[in-house]
Amino acid sequence: MRTIQGVSVSAGIAIGTVRVLAAVDYAVERRLIDDPQAEMDRFRAARDTAVAQLKQLRDNVAAEFGENKAELFDAHRLMLQDPDYAECVEGLIAQDKVNAEFAVKSAAEQFAAMFAAMDSSTMQARAADVKDVSRRVMNVLQGKRDSTAQDGSVQGDAVQNGIVQNGIAQNGESHIIFAEDLAPSDTAQLDRAKVLGLVTAKGSANSHTAILARTMGLPAITGIGDAFDPADDSHVAVIDGTSGAVFVDPDEATLTEYRRRKAEAEEHLSLLRKLKGKPTETKSGQRVHLYANISRPSDAAAVLANDAEGIGLFRSEFLYLEREDWPTEEFQFDAYGQVAQEMGDRPVIIRTLDIGADKQVDYFNLSHEDNPALGYRAIRICLTRPEIFKVQLRALLRASAYGNIAIMLPMITSVQEVRDAKRILEEAKSELRGERIDFNESIQIGVMIETPASVIMADELAAEVDFFSIGTNDLTQYTLACDRQNPSLERFADPHSPAVLRMIQMTIEAAHRHGIWCGICGELGADLSLTDTFLRLGIDELSVSPTSVLPLRNVIRNH
């Protein structure tokens, strides 16, 4: 057995035979031409054909996966129709008197290098997109056929290599695809019934190919680098799209374990099919919004796979915890924007930086504290180091132009803290307006209710914000004076304590008095023994781990 570690970009387990997708050589002969105008006309005609093919591919994707997932191919069409792109190609033809194929390839390399040199990982991922659309134009110029066009005119790499022919695997079998890389258009053409999963040497979680894989429900792993071996063709493999592990020629113990996990996942999927699209409401008609909690952008796939209505808690601190230096505004904007785009119209509630206590980061240079749970953490860091906070707020605001983002402040104990945070938010908004950068002017802001002080001040806090979300883990800790990191206090730290439940009740009542909604985003939200209590208290929203969404929906619908 050979074990390879890659980067997970789409969750799920696949077990099957490997089909290696051979890299297609796009070497283009450089030919000198006598009639530059005729060559420009060839380019323009090929570009128009490619644009029409992308329109067909866009319509196919929209029909199967929804309009928001088809926007990628609208972007591809805009790339081809960009005057700068056409000017570059035609300039090369006119100045160097070269054939259109060579000019298109040269222009693609120039634009791809420009994107790859940018700081933003989202823009870096566009390098693959410009190569993809340029390849399509070259294929038209060279007379190759395409399975996406209605008349059957240019094939992508996957088709050329015998993986798919008009949506059908040629040998009738299903495979795990191994490739150096996959273009977005190739991924969109794969037949999900014949492709079990994807493993690539190159690529990133931000790439459109990765986003398409998540949309299609295909387990996918990227970044295996030099471990990619064409000799793996026809070997048996297991891929774990959650951990990023690939097992080639797995031993019996590994096969047995992953078959068990896959069976559990399929049982869960059966529940999904039964409940997907169904409203989360009781038999008496009481409606509850059911969201999911995530820590990383890649987790959004699990939110959609489990049919959550949105993201109730994006723990943004993991963008800080998993780095050795400060995450830049661009880095954060990429992460938030990616999730916002994947979620479409569904709400994405992002908790601002919650570092401190049990979550320490070396480069913050925080002083040692005897009692860090009651110390310098979360909103207290943000308000005393506004230069850090504003970077995050600017990234959040910019990302709000790409989806339904809301901002949530943690560890609030007073009205003044909320007002101070809103003042810094307004400064960030003013800066972006001055820079003519789009954002959602009416972005919602909420607070986490996780201290007794915030419960007591809930009426005043409700007048300042758009929503409450109760963090039951810390609320239990602070209400019962029990350090949740101390295992010897486990018997005393009872989240079912009447004191904790009364705190929750007081918070919900205060929210409703002031016309705002109130949810729960702590572990208690998934505790099915308390679902009846929360419904009786009038909770508006529950946000739980993605895998807890369907069991909780099932209980609520049967209540």
Image: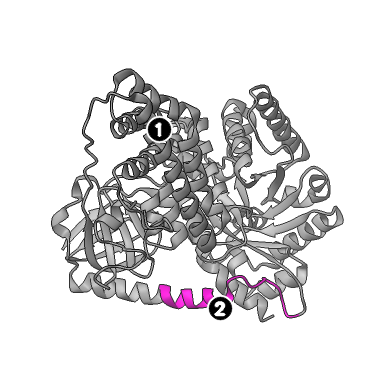
Image position, residue 219 (x, y; %): 37, 61
**Is 148 located above or below residue 26 in the figure?**
below
Quadrant of the rendered structure where residue 121 is? Answer: top left
Measure the C-alpha gap from mark 2 to mark 1. Answer: 54 Å
Judging depth in this view, the residue of 248 and 256 nearest the camera is 248
Q: How is the image coloured?
A: one colour
Magenta highlight range: 265-283
If the image is split into quadrants, where does the N terminus sit?
A: bottom left
Q: Residue at x 61, y 29 (%)?
A: 390
In the image, what residue occupies the spot 54% across and 42% down? Answer: 337
Whether residue 493 appears in this view of the structure is no
Residue that carries the numbered disc 1 in the rendered image:
41
Look at label 1 and name its amino acid.
Asp
Q: Nearer the viewer, residue 46 or 229?
A: 46
Residue, far left: 231
The reply to whether dot 2 and dot 1 touch (C-beta < 8 Å) is no
Image check: 271 left or right of 437?
Answer: left
Instruction: Indicate the position of residue 523 as horizontal and vertical percent values.
Output: 57, 62
Check the image and report above or below for 165 versus 369.
below
Q: Is residue 97 above or below residue 465?
A: above
Q: Percent position (x, y) of residue 449?
A: 69, 51
Q: Is residue 433 visible to us here?
A: yes
Pick the front one: 367 or 280: 280
Task: Please check the rendered image and state whether residue 73 is part of the magenta-colored stretch, yes or no.
Answer: no
Question: Magenta stretch containing residue 275, yes or no?
Answer: yes
- Amino acid carrying mark 2 in the image: Lys
Residue 274's tag is: 2
